[in-house]
Amino acid sequence: MRALEALVSLGPVTMAARDLGGYLARVAEAACTALDFGVCLIYLRDPSDNSYHVRTTRGVGDDERGVKLAATVPALVLGALTTREHQLAHGFGYYVRGDDHVWRTPLVSRCFAMAASPRVHQCSWLQGDLFLIPLPDGDGPPSGFLVLDEPLDGLRPSDDTLLGAMTLAKGCADALLYGEMQSRSTRNEHLYNKEHDAVQHLQTLDDLRNDFVSTISHELRTPLTGIKGYTDSLIMHWDRMDDDRRRAAVTKISFSTERLNRLVQDLLFISRIESGTLPLERTIAALDEPIASAVHAVAQSFAGQRIEVRPPREAAQVLADMDRVEQVVTNLLDNGAKYSVEGKPVRVSWARRGSRVLILVTDRGPGISTEDQKKLFARFGKLGHAPRAGHVGTGLGLYISRNLVEAMGGRLRVRSLPGQGSVFAVTLPAASDTSRAWREG
């Protein structure tokens, strides 16, 4: 009957418990209720130091509980208490009398000096007696053990009680093992997912590397083909070429060489950005000078291109690297001029907006679809639009520009619709009293 009561008590505990502490507390409650003991302590093994620690108590006073919870029982002590001479009939646990010789060993008595504080009875259960039930863990050392004390009837446990205690301990051990298996399963699943994500990431990086190598090969091949083709023509047909044809061939070689040089420089620049080795010299300054320099550079490259400059009514100062600001605006103006309809102006304006300075570059090009905008700022993110004759880009300008802007604490976005041109918006941190103090300091 006692065994049945213990099993009934343990069943809902095993099913309902979610956390270890709550589960063990209910096991201790079940042990005391079903087996008529006033005190129950549950120890669990710590594999890191091969010792046992109290994890929960029931029927222990507040003053005593702290001492018990702090107690550590080395495996050696547990071995001294679970010898054959202390084993109960049928292997139902271990009973160590309070006057047993084992308590003369200081290490043993120190571990359980506070482990039992039963009432004094003139009966067979004596003060200091210890009833210990291991939690079996296969062929290895016990995963823990229960200590039961202060039987309500003041008697040593009967066979029925012993069987119930062992059933309870076995169920508890099985539940702990199941919980550990679930925990390991969860950890393994987590590790698997982590490894799977790492493999997927490496696969993505490998795909990106292959795409990058393929794209680079194509981008390098285009100017190199031009250089080689015109060079071969000059070598083979020099005597049959007049000065104009020779000059045209050399001009084409120079154009292809310049394109190749821009590509190499852009790639080196990207490498410095992505590795974090690109220095930024932030200063507080107005945008008039870097924007004027960018406008002049683009106007020189695109003869006859109108560029409208609309400065703010009040000076707008930023905290940024002015050389990089000029580089970004040059890229955006160059991009706008390259794809705008000839005769249509490209406009650049800027103004302060709260804690930011907004730079807008507006063109009258073919516009960009929402789908194409997703790849616009990628490396070699070229779209299907044909640039103005003689102005082929590397496909890296916008990628570089966005990285530069973000490195300076800003953002680069685009608003565009097919057939309606595009507006590229750059926001940069505006100079404030704080940034001025930082700069002066």
Image: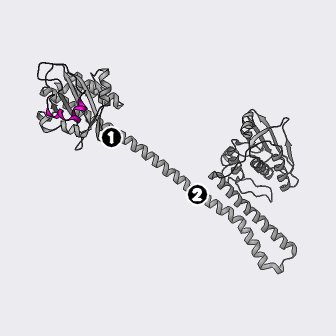
Q: How far apart are the two marked residues, 1 and 2, measured between alpha carbons? A: 41 Å
Range covered by the magenta-colored residues: 98-122
Q: Choose top left, top right, bottom left or bottom right for residue 95.
A: top left
Quarter holding the C terminus is top right
Q: Is residue 412 above or below residue 220?
A: above
Q: Is residue 91 visible?
A: yes
Horizontal side of residue 43 vs 165, given as left or right: right
Q: Secondary structure at mark 1?
A: helix
- Amino acid type for the residue under numbered disc 1: Met
Kind of element beneath mark 2: helix
| x and y, in percent, of residue 243 in the image | 87, 74
- Asked which quadrant contains residue 113, the reply is top left
Q: Farthest residue toward the right?
A: 304
Q: Is residue 397 left or right of residue 188?
A: right
Q: Amino acid at mark 2?
A: Arg
Percent of width and height locating residue 154: 15, 20
Q: Which residue is mark 1?
A: 181
For the residue pair 25 and 362, the one nearer the viewer reads as 25
Residue occupying image coordinates x 33% and y 39%: 180
Return the mark for residue 20.
none
Describe residue 436's horizontal placement relative to residue 186 as left or right. right
Residue 195 x, y percent position in the rendering: 45, 49
Considering depth in this image, is 134 or 113 the residue closer to the camera?
113
272 left or right, relative to 243: left
Q: Which residue is mark 2?
A: 209
| Mark 2 surroundings: few (<14), some (14-19) or many (≥20) residues within 10 A | few
Q: In the displayed orientation, state which residue is furthest to the bottom.
A: 239
Quadrant where the image shows the N terminus: top left
First reached walking from the N terminus: tag 1 or tag 2 = 1
Label 1 environment density (alpha carbons within 10 Å; few <14, some 14–19, many ≥20): few
Q: Position of residue 136 (x, y in %)?
A: 23, 38
Report if residue 99 lies within the magenta region.
yes
